[in-house]
Image: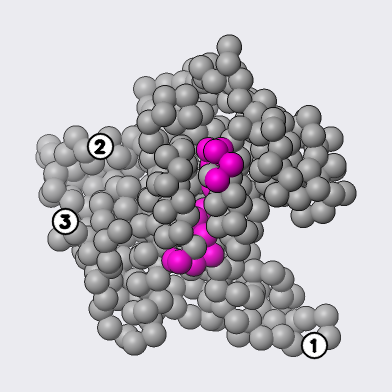
Amino acid sequence: MPQIGIGLVGGGYMGKAHAVAMSSVGAVFNTALRPRLAVVAGSTPESSERYRAAYGFAHAADDWRALVAHPEVEAVVIASPQTTHRAIAEAAFTAGKAVFCEKPLGASLEDAQAMVAAAKASGLPNMVGFNYVRTPATQFVRQLLADGVIGDVTWFRGEHTEDFLADPSLPANWRCFGRPAGCMGDLAPHMINCALALLGDIAELSAKVETIHSTRPGPAGSVTVDNDDHGQMMVRFASGVMGHLYFSRAATGRKMGYAYEIHGTKGAIRFDQEDQNAVWLYRAEGPEAMRGFTKILTGPAHPDFEPFCQGPGHGTGYQDQIIIEARDFLQAIHTGQPVWPTFRDGLAVAQVIETAFASAADGRWHSVPSN
């Protein structure tokens, strides 16, 4: 069975998830192309060696440049900070290697545009890591919408809310500095991607972006937080449907609030990532006294569930989303055909975020440029 050498840039939280995914994806999905853990690169030679020993890579590289140039690396997975994404991706494409990049695609709209251009010029497979939209539940919701189960969609509400910076007494960390590390750069891309996947392009929006806790304790006293804690936008989709999106890293009590509600002329759908193996479906049919939301537990009848477990309701987890991503990336490489979401889909998200900041600055509705 053909193998492909994987180079992983970044060995921390997401790096570990991708290493585990590449180690197990062949067994889970019986992929035609089997990944081989070739080279890993951390932020220092010492961390690279530590990740190599922990995750089972054959080699540790001193830095990402050495990894991209390594002859055993045939595809590159980028799981390092977004400020590094553009340079790594451009170098990998120049070296003739397919690229999977964690979200967001880059640290800015300019980065995202340049990365899409580099991917297009190379003709090589490319994907961006929006993992939450790959749960069996949300894949099932996409099917329900495509099949018209709830009729014509009339409203969409989405959020990505967490509380890891809800407490103002928490010391400042790297997430408190620089626009790319703010809530709009960190959490917002996931739900924007979800909204685009479920409802299509956003035509226009009106946004507000704010810092709730403007100062935090630092090593030598109070420091100023220079990025955003939360943001919201009213949107009009290209289809004409209205919607609302909210993102927060200071939503007390919310741990993984990637959630949405969709209303239609014949029903409604609710989903919450904190209960990621359930979809709530309402059908506007039958006697009024008998109507209500039905909880549908995901199982082998739903997309990408059975390879993990044959028992309905037993559930999938976070790591399984990353394994599904790995399967898709290998499929794109093996077939030579694009698999959603590509870098261009990541650019679409970056364009919405850039438009939101422009709207927040002048208080006006803005059209979202098409890419």
- In the rendering, at what x and y percent does residue 84 appear? 62, 59
* Kind of residue at badge 3: Ser
Would you say residue 308 is visible in this rendering?
Answer: yes
Check the image and name the residue furthest to the right: 46
**Viewer-side residue, 322 vs 268:** 322
- Horizontal side of 109 relative to 226 (left or right) equals left
Q: Is 321 one of the magenta-colored residues? A: no
Residue identifier under label 3: 239
Q: Quadrant of residue 201?
A: bottom left
* Residue at 13% over, 48% down: 152
Report the mark closest to the observer, 3 or 2.
3
Q: Are marks 3 and 2 in contact (CB under 8 Å)?
A: no
* Kind of residue at badge 1: Gly
Q: Quadrant of residue 366?
A: bottom left
- Horizontal side of 128 relative to 13 (left or right) equals left
Residue 221 badge: 1
Marks 1/2: CA distance? 53 Å
